[in-house]
């Protein structure tokens, strides 16, 4: 069986159904997901709106990019310090 990929909008839509009182068993049956998947989504996205989730993803991407930049600059600095210490 192939896994179905859900967009953020779809995941939040599924969670919203449960929030308004639709039984979880019915929600997961309609969506074709497992109970484990439902609760994993709930832990990650409960109470958030689609734009908030998108903003969170953008911030995570930017944070990763900045961490990589810091690592590269730290390596450059270390290499320069090694070169300078051997010259003098």
Image (spheres, rainbow, N blue to C red):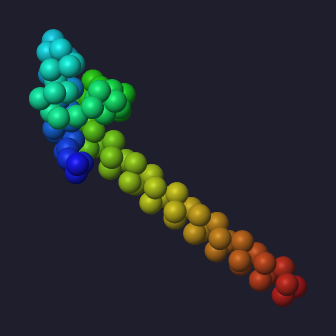
Q: Please identify the residue farthest to the top as the structure is shown.
A: 21
Figure quadrant of the C terminus: bottom right
Q: Nearer the viewer, residue 67 or 28?
A: 28
Q: Quadrant of residue 44?
A: top left
Percent position (x, y) of residue 43? 36, 28
Left or right: 42, with 86 as reference point: left
Q: Nearer the viewer, residue 4 or 49?
A: 4
* Whether residue 14 can be seen here: yes
The relative height of residue 79 versus residue 40 in the rendered view (above or below) is below
Left or right: 37, with 13 as reference point: right
Could you tell me how many numbered marks the image carries?
0
Left or right: 44, with 1 as reference point: right
User: Residue at point 72% right, 71% down?
Assistant: 78
* Whether residue 18 can be seen here: no
The relative height of residue 68 versus residue 20 in the rendered view (above or below) is below
User: Residue at point 14% right, 15% down?
Assistant: 22
Percent position (x, y) of residue 56? 33, 42
Q: Please identify the residue farthest to the right as the structure is shown.
A: 88
User: Residue at point 38% right, 54% down?
Assistant: 61
Left or right: 61, with 6 as reference point: right
Percent position (x, y) of residue 74? 64, 66
Q: Nearer the viewer, residue 8 or 28?
A: 28
The relative height of residue 76 versus residue 63 in the rendered view (above or below) is below
User: Residue at point 52% right, 64% down?
Assistant: 69
Percent position (x, y) of residue 10? 16, 38
Q: Please identify the residue farthest to the front as the structure is shown.
A: 1
Q: Please identify the residue farthest to the bottom as the structure is shown.
A: 87
């Amino acid at each position: 069986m192939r896994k179905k990929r859900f967009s953020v909008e779809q995941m939040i839509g599924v969670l919203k159904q449960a929030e308004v009182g639709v039984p979880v068993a019915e929600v997961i049956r309609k969506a074709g997901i497992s109970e484990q998947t439902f609760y994993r989504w709930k832990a990650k996205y409960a109470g958030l709106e689609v734009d908030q989730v998108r903003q969170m993803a953008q911030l995570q991407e930017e944070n990763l990019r900045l961490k990589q930049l810091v690592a590269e600059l730290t390596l450059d600095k270390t290499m320069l310090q090694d070169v300078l210490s051997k010259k003098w």
